[in-house]
Image (cartoon, rainbow, N blue to C red):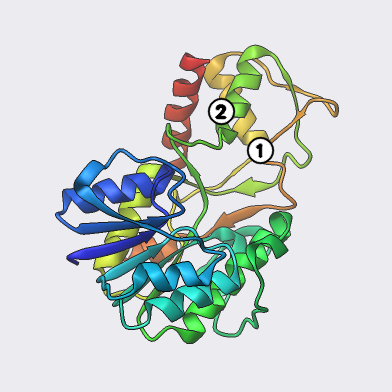
Amino acid sequence: MKSALLLGGTQFVGKRLVQLLLDEGVEVTIATRGMTPDSFGNQVTRLIINREDAASLDLAFKDKEWDVVFDQSCYSSQEALDALQYLKGKVKKYLFTSSQAVYDFGSNHPEESFNPLVFNPALKSRKEYIGYVGYQEAKRAAEAILFQNADVPVVSVRFPIIIGKDDYTNRLKFHVEHVKEGRSMFIEHPAFRYSFIDSKEAASFLLTMAKSDYHGPINPGSEDDISLSELNGFIEDLIGTKAILREDGDPSPYNLPGSWSVNTSLAQSMGFTFTALEDLLKNLILHYAKNV
């Protein structure tokens, strides 16, 4: 891999991936709306696109080629179709940042739990996908468009919840702060279980998959999952303060309609290892507790 195009790439995992690619001597092009500054200076080429304006992709990608495209900003079936159209003949491999959200709510889903080759996607814009259910349909439909229509190998990386010190969503931080400061929380379903992955390992996994011969969907992440009740208990043990749970408390940002966790056996069988969930959470909880 000598050149890579990132659709997105200026936040969170994207920034980490750009740096990993640069460290390997890859020529990197970032295609975004140009609204979020980055720190890469003249190390990268920048293109301006709007995923909701197909003409902008046509203009930006004209007369250009890359070995791999990392699609991190696709949130609709129409955007996936537009990307395929205007990158046709310009890339050799397509890495799609997907989500465990493609699976029905539940725990320990293997890749076979959702088959994009048999899913019938409706063409919609991102504004037509509302809430968590909309997000689920958007990722399913985008995968279906890519796997059913691409003429290059496609890898769909179905990430679980990504966490790290650079996590701008602050969802785990919310729990740590509320426990340490004695602020009440509302957890609607304490028994629902979720999978996680470290942000550094998420970026590294994307790079490794781009260099591999694998194509198809794959679940990365820490092997175990955890319930919100267990998560709060873990925070309590590390901080030494009891969580206050009340119906009128601040709603947890992890209040989802159901469990979402994945089976990572395929990735493990390919030689991938991820930080144990307990170690990952412990390091972050102590980091957040120290900086509250």
Q: Amino acid at mark 2?
A: Lys
**Image location of residue 32, percent across then percent down:** 43, 55
What distance separates the C-alpha of mark 2 from that of mark 1? 14 Å
In the displayed structure image, the side of residue 184 where residue 86 appears, left or right: left
**In the current view of this chain or complex, which residue is farthest to the left?**
25
* Residue at position x 49%, y 58% in the image: 73
Quarter of the image where one finds residue 207 = bottom left
For badge 1, the amino acid type reads Leu
Q: Indicate the position of residue 70 as horizontal and vertical percent values.
A: 37, 63
Mark 2 crowdedness (10 Å alpha carbons): few <14, some 14-19, many ≥20: many
Residue 23 seen anywhere in this rendered image of the structure = yes
Give the secondary structure at mark 1: helix
| Badge nearest the viewer, 2 or 1 | 2
- Is residue 163 or residue 96 the one in the foreground? 96
Image quarter in which the N terminus is found: bottom left
Q: Which mark is on residue 173?
A: 2
Which sits earlier in the primary sequence, circle 2 or circle 1? 2
Pointer 1 local density, CA inside 10 Å: few below 14, some 14–19, many at least 20? many
The residue nearer to you, when weighing 165 against 93, is 93
Q: Nearer the viewer, residue 51 or 130?
A: 51
| Cβ atoms under marks 2 and 1 closer than 8 Å | no
Q: Relative to 104, is 177 above or below?
A: above
Q: Which residue is mark 1?
A: 228
Q: Helix, strand or loop at disc 2? A: helix
User: 247 or 170: nearer the eye?
Assistant: 170
Percent coordinates x, y for residue 157 in the rendering: 44, 63
